[in-house]
């Protein structure tokens, strides 16, 4: 299934994408797409619904496909070639940081360039959505705790991230710095999560091309690893790192400006489009 949320900001309704690419409304069956809906039992109930019997809608806006996200975790430097372009060594263990859940927005919402920013950057990433509580999970069973996957743009302000003291969170958490979606694709629809092509363009110019096969730490390892340090709850999101091609790595470094348009996508996970606006 491809689960989504549609409607105005703060008033989204649950829905799904049918086999013909049309949006169907699920609000007659569930109140929203939250962690409890993403359990194996919840997904089984949704899979039993005939999409043809659901109302068709033509949404003016797609919202974030998961509501009430508890944790938005990110993995840094998870592609060796991206680590090199930023001047860093490939890590021996996953580099973890948190992105504020208030950064989450819809896949096609405008993205704000923060006040005082001159280094706002792009990062196409695969996102993991947790469906079952995970604590001290073995890697061989880690994927059993995953509800599905979605596309993430881990928007970053590099000066805030690296030159303003402390850790990376302040460069990652501005409002709108977490576009997710357009939909959550359930795990059963992805044949091999370590073989997903990704891309990102700025104003129609290709900036990033990658595939999850080149991750340093794969999806199962990440879920298991993170669960050794904290309990992952249903609805939590993990952004798994970006391939090379970010603005910071260009020569000279190149960053986003007001009015530019970022488009990105991943095979089987859909596409996003964001216009850059000044905060």
Image (cartoon, rainbow, N blue to C red):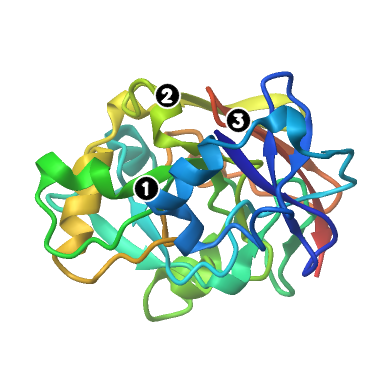
Q: Is residue 263 above or below residue 279?
A: above
What is the CA distance from the residue labelled 1 to the residue labelled 3?
27 Å
**Mark toward the start of the polypeptide (1 vs 3):** 1
Q: Nearer the viewer, mark 2 or mark 1?
A: 1
* Tag 2 residue: 196
Residue at disc 1, secondary structure: helix
What is the CA distance from the residue labelled 2 to the residue labelled 1?
23 Å
> Which of the pair 222/186 is nearer the observer?
186
Residue pictured at 48% horizontal, 78% vertical:
164
Residue 1 image offset from top left, x and y in percent: 55, 33
In-image side of 162 versus 257 (left or right): left
What is the CA distance from the residue labelled 3 to the residue labelled 2?
10 Å
**Mark toward the start of the polypeptide (2 vs 1):** 1
Residue 46 image offset from top left, x and y in percent: 55, 43
> Which of the pair 202/86 is nearer the observer?
202
Residue pictured at 32% horizontal, 33% vertical:
81
* Tag 3 residue: 265
């Amino acid at each position: 299934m491809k689960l989504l949320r549609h409607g105005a900001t703060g008033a989204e309704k649950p829905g799904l994408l049918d086999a013909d690419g049309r949006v169907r409304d699920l609000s007659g069956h569930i109140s929203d797409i939250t962690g409890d809906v993403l359990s194996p039992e919840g997904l089984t109930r949704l899979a039993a619904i005939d999409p043809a019997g659901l109302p068709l809608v033509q949404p003016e806006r797609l919202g974030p496909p998961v509501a009430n996200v508890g944790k938005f975790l990110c993995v840094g430097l998870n592609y060796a070639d991206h680590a090199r372009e930023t001047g860093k060594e490939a890590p021996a263990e996953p580099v973890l940081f948190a992105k504020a859940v208030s950064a989450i927005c819809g896949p096609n919402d405008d993205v704000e360039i923060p006040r005082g920013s001159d280094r706002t950057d792009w990062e196409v990433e695969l996102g993991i959505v947790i469906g079952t509580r995970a604590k001290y999970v073995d890697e061989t069973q880690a994927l059993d705790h995953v509800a599905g996957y979605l596309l993430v743009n881990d928007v970053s302000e590099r000066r805030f991230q690296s030159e303003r003291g402390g850790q990376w969170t302040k460069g990652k958490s501005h409002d709108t710095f977490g576009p997710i979606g357009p939909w959550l694709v359930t795990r059963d629809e992805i044949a091999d999560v370590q073989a997903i092509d990704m891309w990102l363009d700025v104003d129609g110019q290709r900036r990033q091309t990658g595939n999850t096969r080149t991750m340093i730490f794969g999806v199962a390892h990440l879920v298991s690893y993170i669960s050794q340090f904290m309990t992952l709850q249903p609805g939590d999101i993990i952004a798994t790192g970006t391939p090379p091609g970010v603005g910071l790595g260009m020569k000279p470094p190149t960053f986003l400006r007001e009015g530019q348009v970022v488009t990105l996508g991943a095979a089987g996970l859909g596409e996003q489009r964001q216009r850059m606006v000044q905060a």
